[in-house]
Amino acid sequence: MNTLLAPLVMDDLIQAAYFIAALLFIIGLKRMSSPKGAKNGIIWAGVGMLIAGLITFLWPGMHNYILILAAIFIGGMLAWWSGRRVPMTAMPQMVALYNGMGGGAAAAIAAQELIRGQALALAPVSLAVVGGIIGAVSFTGSLIAFAKLQGLIKKSLRYRIQQIVNSLVLLITLALGIWIIVLHGAAPMSVVIPFFTLALLFGILVTLPIGGADMPVVISLYNACTGLAVAFEGFVIGNAAMIIAGMVVGAAGTLLTQLMAKAMNRSIANVLFSNFGETVSGSTESVSGSLKPMDAADAGVMMAYANKVIIVPGYGMAVAQAQHKVWELTQLLQNRGVTVKFAIHPVAGRMPGHMNVLLAEAGVPYDLISDLDEINPEFATADAALIIGANDVVNPDARNKPDSPIYGMPILNADKARNVIVIKRGQGRGFSGVENTLFYMDNTRMLYGDGQEAVTRLIQSIKSIE
Amino acid sequence: MIDGFIALYIFMLAAFTGYEVISRVPVILHTPLMSGSNFVHGIVLVGAMVALGNANNLAEQIIGFIGVLLAAGNVVGGYVSTERMLAMFKTSQDKNKGSRA
């Protein structure tokens, strides 16, 4: 085919295909940001990817086609197989894994360009180096984030001179990068190899000390980083689709990271450089009042005769696999004429929106689900708030107690409901290690038990009312 | 092929586009959207293919192969996970249409 078409026409065809791909990506992302169009948003973007991928086989002067096909086949099959099987609760770490792969690919393009040792113009070599660092850090950093959420790495590694060591590794990496830029990319292997090795090492070192609760913000940040790296490498190899798609994701990812950090009342700098969760776990102040248990029969009656019940699910519900039972409970209540709503805190689950996915999986329609700003005024008119596996996100201390470590975090005002029922395994504390004053309030009752089993008892109790 | 300043303009406009496109997204879509944008930067596959397609010695072929392998994982994994998450979002009306009752 290459011989039939003049190279110029061929080039126009390829560029036109990339243009269409970039357009489809933007439309796809736009659609994915509203619930109605979200489902075909991914299809639009998928078509764009298919067009861009296929047309690239016609790129003039390429060889190694068998290697390319083999790599696509192996990488694609492994990802397809893992992506299909993974349970919804594990989705955040899978996103981290696939994102890391993209970062690694961007770093590989940079490495490919730099190991040639050929002189390049200043702009491409600078962006190749910067994109290479960002891509490499995103690659190893995302792998560590995956390993942490998957439970493969349980401890957060911290030691005294950690910040100094990390800064030193970063400084040497940057120095080697500048050296490569000064040489216009014609650097010897003895510079290029340590440069990439240290960049990969830095990604590991900087992610290891970050706690599990902060991981969503980190994953989102690496997602934005990969986007940037892709855009920069796109410039190096002169590919407009990569520049546009990478930059759009870089900007969107940065905004998403800020939204998440804000929802968790954390700044991004805080997430990366401080040790939340470890320092505050020592607080042992006592709370006035007592925990008042309630049995499922009474709780069931209270909910069955209510006008309005607001359910506040947390990650504990997902771990107990209780979401299907919760939907069954919801339907039972709805059939009795009770208005049921779900209140989702922005960071319920493991990252913003994760809880919505988990509820959607169980079959809960998304119009029953409200976010923080919508639902908070409604608690005052609710007869009962049912808290399942959530803790810090309903702690009124965040509103009332300026010396609390979680003070200032936006919370769901479940304490404003007339009655509060808390389903909880035992008397432990939340992620932050802070005692929850909600549990000690006069109108709060504790329903102890595993999430799924406790909800099952509630269902039986309501069914027996008939 | 793409001039320095033209590229700078593309960088700037694409950044604003990304910011605008996402700015009004409801919280319920944050996770699928993160996954969706993760899929979009899978376009790195195209660059990795060109890099491997132009590899001339063993070292370049190995690095290029790793690049394409990782990028393909990004594309396929990103698509599958996003599609699975989005397939679950239904409204009450969709539900009633779907079920026989």
Image (cartoon, coloured by chain):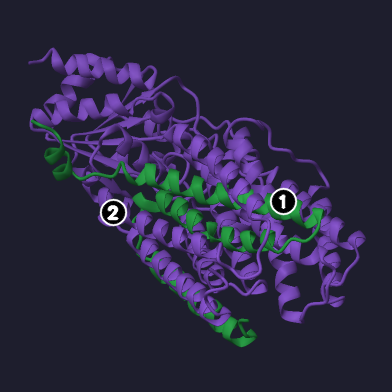
Q: Nearer the viewer, residue B67 or A245?
A: B67
**Chain under disc 2:** A
User: Considering the numbered disc 1 on the image, is that residue within a helix, a strand or a loop?
Assistant: helix
**Mark 1 residue crowding within 10 angstroms, few (<14) / some (14–19) / many (20+):** many
Q: Residue at x 68, y 33 (%)?
A: A155
Q: Residue at x 31, y 51 (%)?
A: A39
User: Considering the numbered disc 2 on the image, is that residue within a helix, a strand or a loop?
Assistant: loop
Left or right: residue A437 compared with residue A167: left
**Chain under disc 1:** A
Colour given to chain A in the rendered image: purple
What residue did someone put label 2 on?
A35
What residue did someone put label 1 on?
A203
Q: Nearer the viewer, residue A393 or A175?
A: A175
Q: Is residue A377 above or below residue A297?
A: below
- Residue A303: x percent and y percent? 18, 26
Residue B100 shows in the view: yes
- Residue B12: x percent and y percent? 53, 79
Q: Residue at x 76, y 81 (%)?
A: A121
- Residue A311: x percent and y percent? 27, 35
What amino acid is labelled 2 in the image? Answer: Pro
Colour given to chain B in the rendered image: green
**Mark 2 residue crowding within 10 angstroms, few (<14) / some (14–19) / many (20+):** some
Residue A292 shows in the view: no
Left or right: residue A462 compared with residue A208: left
Q: Is residue A348 above or below residue A183?
A: above
Q: Is residue A53 above or below residue A215?
A: below
